[in-house]
Image: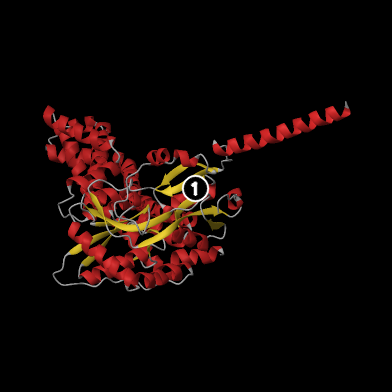
Amino acid sequence: MTLSDKLYTILIQGGSWQTILGGLWVTVQISVFALLIGTVLGALVCLLRTRRNRVARGVASVYIAVLRGTPVLMLLLLLYYGVFARAGLKPVMVAVITFALNVSAHVAELLRSALEAADRGQAEAARTLGFSAWDTFRLIMLPQVLRIAKPVYQSTIVNLIQWTSVVGYVTITDLTRVINNTASRTMQPLLTIIIGMLIYLALSYIVFGLFALSDKLKEKAHTAA
Amino acid sequence: MKKTVTFILALMIAFFACLSVCVAEDAANTGAVQKYGDIGRLSKLNITEDELNEVLKDIMVDSICNRYVFYDTMNDMIMALNRGDIVALETDQNTVRYIASRNDHIVDRPPYMNPNMLVFCMLLRGEDTELRDQISACIAEMNKDGTVEAMKQAYIEDVIAGKEPEAIEPQVFQDAETIRVAVTGDRPPMDYVSAGGEPLGFNTALIAEIAKRLELNIEMVNVTCAARGIALATGVCDIVFWMEVGDFENWEGADLEDQPDNTIVTEPYMSVPLWWAVLKDSPVVNVYRDN
């Protein structure tokens, strides 16, 4: 069997490219929804984590410690086969909840460290100049926090996409599962895995590309101004 | 004097010849068989790798392999075979034939020692006795009327020969109960996923036919090999396919060590020898004792 025959069997024959795209779509869906929910939840946890109230701070610290300190696969298995076993939730929903929780812990810590790294002197100056607390946060602190957090957030997204490859454990046919099934059917595990890796790599570079594009657009806007 | 020396020499030769035969026999009896490496197997449902090796430790003395190593997927195991982590991949004969038919560098062989028969059946939760009995009756009927034989040709022999069967579309019955069946997609031609993404294979066709006869709806749930037990126990699926070494004719009352607690077994629907896939250039290919 030549390489082109193998590639044909893996990628084209019987419409397998559609199956691979289907798996990719599931991976993208889980990643996007988990990221959106996780980011909002992470911001709320960060808010609690930076409160003066010791209880709120303690709850947030435990939340972050547990979710960052345990493997996401364990959490997924616990939620799917335990907590939500009889809830009638679809496996994809459970996966979104799991990854959203995991991402939220990472985002909370990421935002907290960005907040600490931001120049507090500027916030104090703004308050002295009569800015409200909200305006000080919105106009002075938030742009700095976003700028500091951006590179790590970008890595969190790429990590999230890669972490989702374990959802096959809870009956979801994502990209990794499709790749495994294809490898079993064609009996070409190495080549199929390389193809799978290339697809994940492309996905990661799309994320990096989007961030680079946003930087360029911002730069252009600044230059125009 | 010359005669005496010749006699003593002859005696000594005879003595050493006897001694070497005894040592060789003793070596065979005590398991001093040349070992070539480990045997790979898909993870069992209940028994762990260590438990299986403990159970088989006396038998393995006479084997050309050291021990069993478990893998969660067939792909992992094929890659382990290719890179030399294991010298033999052990599973049912049909799967081994499928693997050998798709890999030029792999050949199928009977196991080094006399092959055991694997019996295929289904596992259900302990409380589902009614469903189990219905399925068992159906299997008996299908074995009798030749349906199972016809399916073997279409979903095993033809697939190994390279003919892809049509996608299996289970019949839908209004207001009927839906049973969820775990498929791993990892054991062609018994259980795999087609290029179009639909569950295919002998097991899938069999359960679709059973559901049709019992007027039940079925839903295929794609579960990894290692997660089958937990999926059954937690109600994610109602049926998992399972195979165990056993006697097809005398199935009832067999001691099945791999059977998890609180599960029940259906009537077996097929029996296939346990078989090995080995690399074509492996020394194991031509080392056979009992076969």
Query: Which amino acid type is marked by label 1?
Result: Ala
Q: Which of A216 and B219 is in front in this view?
A: B219
Q: Position of residue B264 (x, y in %)?
A: 24, 53
Q: Where is residue B85 in the image (x, y as percent from the top left)?
A: 51, 44
Query: Residue at (46%, 59%) from the top-left corner?
Result: B93
User: Where, quadrant-wise, is the N terminus of chain A in this rendering?
Assistant: bottom right
Please identify the quarter of the rendering in which residue A23 is found.
bottom left
Q: Nearer the viewer, residue A86 or A36?
A: A86
Query: Residue at (13%, 69%) from the top-left corner?
Result: B175
B289 displayed left or right of B168: right
Q: Where is residue A190 in the image (x, y as percent from the top left)?
A: 49, 54
Q: Which residue lies furthest to the right in this view?
A: B2
Q: Which of B90 and A86 is in front in this view?
A: B90
Residue A1 sits above or below residue B88 on the image: below
Q: Is residue A197 visible?
A: no
Question: What's the colour scheme?
Answer: secondary structure
Give the structural element (helix, strand or loop) at label 1: helix
Disc 1 chain ID: B
- Label 1 belongs to which residue? B80
Is the residue marked by circle 1 packed among few (<14), some (14-19), or many (20+) residues within 10 Å?
some
B77 displayed left or right of A18: right
B170 displayed left or right of B195: left
Query: Residue at (35%, 69%) from the top-left corner?
Result: B148
